[in-house]
Amino acid sequence: MPGTNLLRLKTLSASLDRTDLRYEAFFAQSPMLFCIARANGHFARLNGAWEKLLGWTEEEMTDVPWTHFVHPDDLVSTVEMAKKMNTRTGLNTTSIFTNRYLAKDGAYHTINWITSVFINGLSYSVAMPGETNPNV
């Protein structure tokens, strides 16, 4: 029955490839801000909506700690939220919060977050932009 096992593996591989393509399309094409953050304080992945909103490329945003982009007045509360999410457990544990992120043009954008606890060193978040304030 080696042929049957090989056929099963090929079928499973093709199914995983289709699932991966769907995930990539969903992640890349969403107008929502999607990100995956590492427990070490860096983004692991961001979708293109971030660059459209803030002007920074994914590479620019993943090369430095995410704290680089947080408004100074929001930094303490944002770091505390990240610590809280890093110590909580449970797959259904999420937090909702708001902070402001620096755009490449110097303006700050309000970001409304829904974020998960860290699972295997990663946190998955979806966010929506709020108002923009160039004077803050």
Image: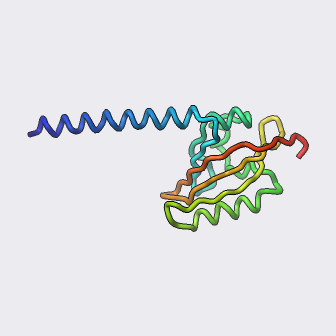
Quarter in which the N terminus is drawn: top left
Q: Nearer the viewer, residue 69 or 123?
A: 123
In the rendered image, residue 126, in percent from the top left (x then y), is placed at: 61, 47
Tell whether 14 sits left or right of 26.
left
Seen in the picture, residue 62 relative to 21 is either above or below; the reply is below
Residue that appears at 49% across and 60% down: 91
- Counting the numbered discs, the total is 0
Q: Residue furthest left?
A: 1
Name the image colouring.
rainbow
Tell whether 21 sits left or right of 30.
left
In the rendered image, residue 39, in percent from the top left (x then y), is placed at: 58, 57
Residue 130 falls in which quadrant of the image? top right
Residue that appears at 78% across and 49% down: 100
Residue that appears at 30% across and 36% down: 13
In the rendered image, residue 107, in percent from the top left (x then y), is placed at: 83, 40
Residue 59 falls in which quadrant of the image? top right
Q: Nearer the viewer, residue 82 or 12?
A: 12
In the rendered image, residue 80, in percent from the top left (x then y), is placed at: 70, 64
Residue that appears at 35% across and 38% down: 16
Seen in the picture, residue 113 relative to 51 is either above or below; the reply is below
